[in-house]
Image (spheres, rainbow, N blue to C red):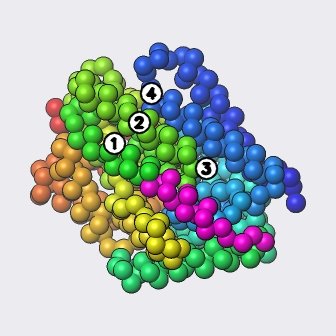
Amino acid sequence: MPTNKIIPYEMLYEALCTTKELVEGGMASGELLVLKSFLKHITTAVKKYIDDAEQGYPIIAHHFAFPTEIFHCFEFVPVVVEGIPYILSALLPEGAESFYDIADSFGHPYHTCTSQKGTMGMTMDGLFHFDIISSPTSPCDNTVASYPIIKEFYNKDIPFILADMPYYRDDRSYKYYGKELKITIEEIGKKIGQEPDYEKLRKAVDLNNEALKYITEINELKKAVPNPIESMLCPLMTAVLAFIPGQVERVLFFKEVLEIAKKRVKNGERAHEGEEKIRTVWPYMSIFFDIGFCEWLDRQLGMTMLFDIFNYLFFDPVDTSKGVDKIFQGLAKQSMNYPMVRQSATFSDDLLDDFVFLSKEYKADCAIFTAHIGCKQSVSVIQLLREALRDELGIPLLSIDLDIGDARYMSIQTIKKEISNFVKTLM
């Protein structure tokens, strides 16, 4: 077995350090504060993963829909399958495109989700060596289809452990899925030779509860006009939620963002010079392959991105005072209501209701829907959402066909042109 089992994380660490050096050295002290905080804390977390991998901790590849705190029962290194290609697509000069192409060359369909296809390509190229692969059975067909292929091309004998996520969202389902999560942990423990430490789990959940408190306060401050937080928080928050579960760095990041927001609201400031002209919600994902895109929205268009699908958490903290089973049940409820899982794994009502609510609550002027090629189930909802926003709030929706992790499907120049033309109809 190779000693270097997470080479993409080393690539990520180098890219983060370079970006951090450029931002800190090239920007004024009061500029890009949220990005600076992000780079500081995620770099620390990724370095720890590399160090732990060198210590021989097992590598657990898992789906983003899992509440990753559950793995804190172990000494482990997490690899969130959907996260690594997209953060590399933002930070590497050539993005993650070569890894998509490797998977395509093996016959994987071009129209599947690049989030999973990227990690598939990295694994086929010998850059990842996993000890465990684990996933829930939701939220999408890409998940069910892609994870077995990762196992097939890497090592047919590697444990692939599934947790059955129910369709309905109710107390009976949360209890059932909580048991599934606990069984998943017990099975992983047997495979890696570690006894689950549930006290470590509780501490990880407590840290995430603290971060959730700050996130809730940040989101409340976004109601201010102008929005005190730069649009870039949307994709950066997605990365923090994926890469830094149950760790103090997550808490510190959101605490620092909250302090930035409080100061700006107190002074009536926007994150950038100039007027806030348009407030928008993005009912699906941010564009990940261009790290400067959100700055273009803020500075060139005066458009603030209030939320994408990952930024408003429709769940409460987990009560950690009532025993292990209740913790798992609480995590199950969070997981089944996690962004994108909540809106994709069941009827379309949740997506429609959630973004009509957010658009009204935060005084959005329009919505922009990134019709990601890999997410067929969400694209089918666009017209329904367009009609709901028009009929209930009188605001328009722009949809853009793209791949959020691959600049070749639709270039950033074309995306900017579409949005600029759309903005002209609003002014």
Q: CA distance from mark 1 to mark 3?
A: 26 Å
Residue highlighted by disc 2: 257
Q: Is residue 194 above or below residue 88?
A: below
Q: Amino acid at mark 4?
A: Leu
Q: Which residues are magenta?
A: 193-209
Residue highlighted by disc 3: 84
Instruction: Tell me if mark 4 has few (under 14), some (14-19) or many (20+) residues whose alpha carbon lies within 10 angstroms of its own.
Output: some
Element on which disc 1 rests: helix
Q: Return the mark for residue 6.
A: none
The residue that appears at 38% across and 33% down in the rendered structure is 259
Q: Amino acid at mark 3?
A: Ile
Q: Nearer the viewer, mark 2 or mark 4?
A: 2
Residue 325 position, x and y percent, is 51, 77
Q: Is residue 6 above or below residue 329?
A: above
Residue highlighted by disc 4: 33
Quadrant housing the N terminus: bottom right
Q: CA distance from mark 1 to mark 2?
A: 7 Å
Do tag 1 and tag 2 residues touch (Cβ < 8 Å)? yes
Q: Amino acid at mark 2?
A: Val
Element on which disc 2 rests: helix
Residue highlighted by disc 1: 218
Residue 227 position, x and y percent, is 27, 34
